[in-house]
Amino acid sequence: MKEDKNICYVCEGQIMSEEDLVICENCNHIYHKICWQEIREECIHCKNKICKEKLNNEK
Ligand SMILES: [Zn+2]
Ligand SMILES: [Zn+2]
C-alpha cells in the first residue's frame, strides 16, 4: 500500500479530507484550511501568502 499521508505543517495532524487541504503555492507545504487561517494566511515556512486549494484543479 502506498503511504499517502497529508500532514499539516502547523499542527502536524493528518488532513483527512481534501476540502480541508490548502497548499502553499511557493513551497508546497500543506495545511488544514483552519490552520492556514490561524497563521493569518501566511506560510510559516516561506512567508508566502498565496495558497492553492486542491479542489480547484481547473486548467
Ligand atoms: Zn493543522
Ligand atoms: Zn510556503
Image (tube, grey):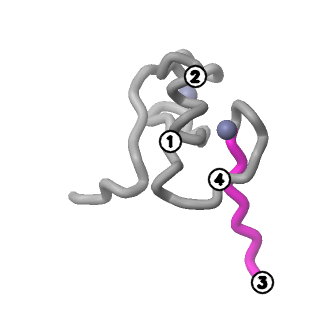
| Dominant secondary structure, magenta | loop
Q: Secondary structure at mark 2?
A: helix
From the Cβ of disc 2, is ligand 1 less than 8 Å away?
no
Label 4 or label 3, whichever comes before in sequence order: 3
Residue receiving disc 1: 23
Q: CA distance from mark 1 to mark 3?
A: 24 Å
Label 2 or label 1, whichever comes before in sequence order: 1
Residue receiving disc 4: 15
Residue that protrudes farthest toward the left in the picture? 59
User: Of discs 3 and 2, which sits in the foreground?
Assistant: 2
Crowd class of label 2 (few under 14; some 14 to 19; many from 20; radius 10 Å): few
Tag 2: amino acid: Glu
Tell me if label 2 and label 1 are in contact, CB under 8 Å: no
For image coordinates 48% across by 22% down, the residue present is 41
For image coordinates 73% across by 52% down, the residue present is 14
- State the mark number for residue 38: 2
Q: Is residue 12 left or right of residue 30?
A: right
Residue receiving disc 3: 1
Span of residues in magenta: 1-8
Quadrant holding the C terminus:
bottom left
Quadrant holding the N terminus:
bottom right
Label 4 or label 1, whichever comes before in sequence order: 4
For image coordinates 70% across by 67% down, the residue present is 4
Coordinates of residue 42 in the picture (x, y in percent): 51, 19
Coordinates of residue 12 in the picture (x, y in percent): 78, 40
